Image (cartoon, rainbow, N blue to C red):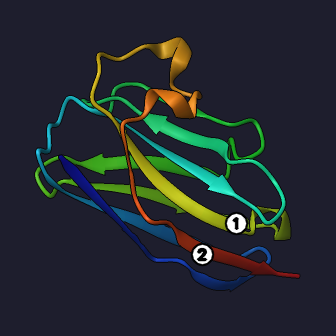
């Protein structure tokens, strides 16, 4: 079992920045691919970013590319999402997730690949 706990959400003005954290515990493994997803009210959960176990591979949704940065500190078992130039349309519940299988570059955007999920943290961007 892997436990994931997100933190760092809250209210921020448009153009501002925020950093989300995801602390992992339990059967943690630095080889796991980790991802961030988000879900806005009335919308389906969507991919935001993913990072390989070593951190050597990252992927981003087009809507956040150039504004968000995913990173990880394996020594601290923590995943991060630095969000800059936030827009009202970034408002959503943000979830971190862990994929315990081997890295599949072409599938990191698929939520079904991920085995464990956090409870989510709300990010609200005011205009």
* Element assignment for label 2: strand
Give x and y (percent) for residue 29.
14, 37
- N-term-proximal mark, 1 vs 2: 1
Mark carried by residue 122: 2
| Residue at screen point 26% across, 32% down | 32
Distance, label 1 to label 2, CA atoms, is 6 Å
| Residue at screen point 36% across, 36% down | 115
Give x and y (percent) for residue 22.
35, 61
In the figure, 108 relative to 11: above or below?
A: above
* Element assignment for label 1: strand
Point out the image quarter for the C terminus: bottom right
The residue tagged 1 is: 92
Give x and y (percent) for residue 121.
52, 72
In the figure, 22 relative to 45: above or below?
A: below
Q: Is residue 97 left or right of residue 30?
A: right
Neighbour tally class for label 2: few under 14, some 14-19, many 20 plus, Cα within 10 Å: some
Task: Out of 120 and 66, give the one closest to the viewer.
Answer: 120
Q: Is residue 28 left or right of residue 108?
A: left
Circles 1, 2 touching at the beta carbon (< 8 Å): yes
Task: Out of 105 and 17, give the one closest to the viewer.
Answer: 105
Mark carried by residue 106: none
**Number of marks in the image?**
2
Give x and y (percent) for residue 72.
30, 48
| Residue at screen point 55% across, 13% down | 106
Most extreme residue toward the right is 127
| Residue at screen point 41% across, 25% down | 57
In the figure, 105 relative to 123: above or below?
A: above
Query: For residue 88, what is the image quadrant?
Result: bottom right
Query: For residue 17, what is the image quadrant?
Result: bottom right
Neighbour tally class for label 1: few under 14, some 14-19, many 20 plus, Cα within 10 Å: many
């Amino acid at each position: 079992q892997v436990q994931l706990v997100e933190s760092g959400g809250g209210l921020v003005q448009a153009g501002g920045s925020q950093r989300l954290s995801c602390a992992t515990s339990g059967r943690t493994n630095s080889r796991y691919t980790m991802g961030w997803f988000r879900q806005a009210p009335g919308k389906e959960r969507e991919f935001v970013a993913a990072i390989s176990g070593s951190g050597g591979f990252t992927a981003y949704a087009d809507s956040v590319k150039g504004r968000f940065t995913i990173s990880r500190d394996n020594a601290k078992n923590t995943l991060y999402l630095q969000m800059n130039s936030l827009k009202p349309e970034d408002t959503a519940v943000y979830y971190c997730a862990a994929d315990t299988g081997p890295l599949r570059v072409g599938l990191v955007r698929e939520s079904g690949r991920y085995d464990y999920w956090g409870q989510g943290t709300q990010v609200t961007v005011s205009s």
